[in-house]
Structures are given as C-alpha cells and as structure tokens.
Amino acid sequence: MGSRTALVEDLMERFPQVPREAVFKEDLLRGGVAFDPSALSDNESGEVKPKSYFIFSFDHGTLPELGEAALRRPPEEIILTGGPYDLRRTVVSVRVNPASPYRVAADDSGMLGLYLDGRRIADVGVPPMPEYYRHKLSNGKSVMEVAPTIQWGYLIYLTVFRVCQYFGAKEECQYCDINHNWRQHKAAGRPYTGVKDVEEVLEALEIIDRYDTQKASTAYTLTGGAITKTVSGRDEADFYGHYAKAIEERFPGRWIGKVVAQALPRDDVQRFKDYGVQIYHPNYEVWDEYLFKMYCPGKERYVGRDEWHRRILDSAEVFGARNVIPNFVAGVEMAEPFGFKTVDEAIASTTEGLRFFMSHGITPRFTTWCPEPTTPLGKANPQGAPLEYHIRLLQAYRQTMEDFGLSSPPGYGEPGPGRAVFSVSSFMDSLPAQDTPAEEEPSRV
C-alpha cells in the first residue's frame, strides 16, 4: 500500500465525521490529478465537456508543461463513485498535475477509473457535451468561451473581465494567477476574450436557455478581476452590474444572479441590488490580519482589511445576511513564507473568521487552494497545504454553522455527500443532506 493511500486512510479513520468522499475530493483539489491520454477529451468536437479555464488555470503546471493535456483538454469535472471505499456520487473540479499520485485512465474495457498508488479506487464519470456547447454565436464564438458552465451544469460562469487591475508583485494577490492565465491562453492562440460584450453574453445565455431543456443551469455568476479605475468607462459596481441588469431584463427570473466583486461601499452594493443581483460574494480571501496584508497587498492598499470586513457587514443590510457569501482561499493560511507553521494554528485562525461572520448571520464559503506554479505562493509551496488542514477545516466549518444555527447557503444546489455539485471545495459535500429542498432562493422581486 502506497504512502498516499496510507495517509488518506489514516485521516478517514481519525476524522470519521468528515465524509470519506470529501477526503478524496480535497486531496484531488489540493494536489491535482494526472490524466492518461485515454481519459482526455476531444475538445469541443467530442462527446465530453472539456475544461473551460473559466477564470484561473487551476493547474499545477503551465500549458506547455501539461503535455497532451494542453492539446486535448481534460474534462471540466469528474464524478467519483463506487470502488473499494463505496464512494457516493462526488463532483470534483479538474486540476491537472502530471506528477500526482492520482491518475484517471481507462481499463481494458474502456471504463474510466481513478487510480491511487496504482490501485483503482473509484469509477469515474465525465460530463457529457451539453447541446448548447454545440452551437456558435452569430460572430463564431463558442458558448464555452463566453458562458461556460461548471458544477455539472448548475452554474453559468460569466468571467466578463478576464484580467485584474491589481497588477504586479506589489498589488496582485499572491496565490492568484488570473493575469497569467490570460497571458498563457493568448500565447497559445486560444480564444480568450478580455472584456466580454454584453450582447455576446445575452446571445450565449439565449442559446443555453433554448437547449438546456432540463433546466439544469440554475444560477449564473458575474465575475472577473478587480477594477480600481474603470473598464469601458464604468466603475466596478456599474461594470459588473450592467450585465446583471441586461440579463434580468432579458431573462427575468430564469437564473439566480450572483456577483463576485470587491467589498464595495454600501451605495455601490445597493447598485448591485438595484441591477437585479441576488447574491453578493465580497471575498475576504484569508482571515488573519498579517496574512491579508502580505498575501493580498492590492486589497490592503486600496481598501484595507478592517474596512473590507465593515463593508461585508454593511452589505448584509442591503442583501440580507443569508445572501452575502464571501469566499476565502482555504490553505493559504499555511503558505510559506509567512503562513502558520502548524495545522492547529491555521485552523484556529480560520475558525475565528468563520465565527466572526457567522455570528452576524453571514455564511462564508471557500475554494480549496490550488498552488498554481506561476504565483509567488505556488512557487514557494508546490505541495499546497497539508491534507489534514483541509479535513479539519471541513469539520470546523460544519461545527461553526451548527453553533450559530445556520444552514447551507442559497445558490449552491443541494448539500450532502452524494448530492452536492459544488466542485471547487467539499464544503457542500460535508454538510448534512436535507430531506426538503435546500435552496431557499433569494427573493426575485
């Protein structure tokens, strides 16, 4: 039995409250997975939905370092089931790492499986190519380029501004490769639209709405880089908000509208609400005061941590606390050179942040840190945070929610192992399943 298998099984035994599915999912998200050529897609010409690179690379290598996976994209996500651990249906975002101990490959019968230390541990399902990906916009652009879907088709991810105005070593968040991802796709000759035209977005959504006959797409997220000045003559609230306004006017009530933006002053947040946004994600990234300054220098310079948090609380008065869902990047707490040295310290700090927001009725969510190699923290920490940190975070997250009587946030689908579709962390997989529908949708009025 290989050492990685032994580590995973030890953690499953030590933390039985955390679903075993989440242990594997977090390990795949933090460390990536390798793909045999038999498991790659045929890009947009095939039967498998390919990885869209919807905002960050979420890979452990640059495109030139990924080999055939850079030419034939891996699937957007994979589903794990069965195997010796009897895994329930688990949706995992694909993060490619040719050196990972995990590998997806087809067996002699052509069935895909996930292998760890050479042993098949799960059956692997891949997302079928959605019908709406087979249709082009009138200008020839693909729906996947303009309005890709993730979370097994649940979420339309509209990265309408593909770069960030926090630029350079003194401003960029130290774990973020949004600007590099833009550069590498342009260098590879791939279509990667910098600023998406609102009419293109509407046309792509019209195609999705027409061909998504099962109404699998339930929400959209408007996002992109931070705007410190203007884009197309608009400030941040107006830039992202005018897409929401156009979408809600064209497709009233069709999707739950969400926006990821900076923590903005209350008047700007009110503009988001007036434009039709229903859920606001003013991401706070990392809780610790010192780490925020060191790892988010642009946000510290332009806004500041304390003001960022005040604005998050103010936004709850506009949207309602339940509809303010700030993200943090789970794992950077332990990133060298400034991060915590022990899992105990890191969990204590992160839990302090969870308790702060949850005591106000605000439920954060998190993305599992992928140490992309072109970022300062990725270069310094190629292995990411220890798996134990991620498993204990899931335990602390659920316990803190229970302490404050909160339930899973809206706009994420069903919670619970075997049901969750949120693919970039296991927080939804680790919450209790509900017999009644989990979605308490924000008011569409």
Image (cartoon, helix red, strand yellow):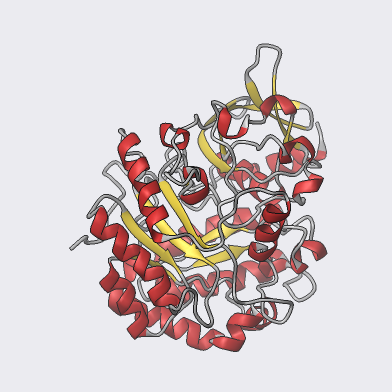
Q: Position of 365 compared to 80: left or right?
A: left
Position of the C terminus by quadrant = bottom left
In the image, residue 76 sits, relative to residue 104, either above or below, namely below
Task: Evaluate whether residue 61 shows in this view.
Answer: yes
Residue at (72%, 37%) from the top-left corner? 71
Residue at (48%, 50%) from the top-left corner? 146
Q: Name the residue nearer the viewer: 164 or 375.
A: 164
Residue at (38%, 44%) from the top-left corner? 433
Q: Position of 150 compared to 414: left or right?
A: right
Residue 28: horizontal and vertical position, in percent? 66, 44
* Number of numbered markers: 0
In this view, the residue farthest toward the front is 139
In this view, the residue farthest toward the left is 445
Residue 18: horizontal and vertical position, in percent? 54, 47
Q: Name the residue nearer the viewer: 431 or 73.
A: 73
In the image, residue 248 sits, relative to residue 164, either above or below, namely above
Task: Evaluate whether residue 277 shows in this view.
Answer: no
The quadrant holding residue 92 is top right
Residue 165: horizontal and vertical position, in percent? 59, 76
Residue 130: horizontal and vertical position, in percent? 45, 33
Position of the N terminus by quadrant = top right
In this view, the residue farthest toward the top is 109
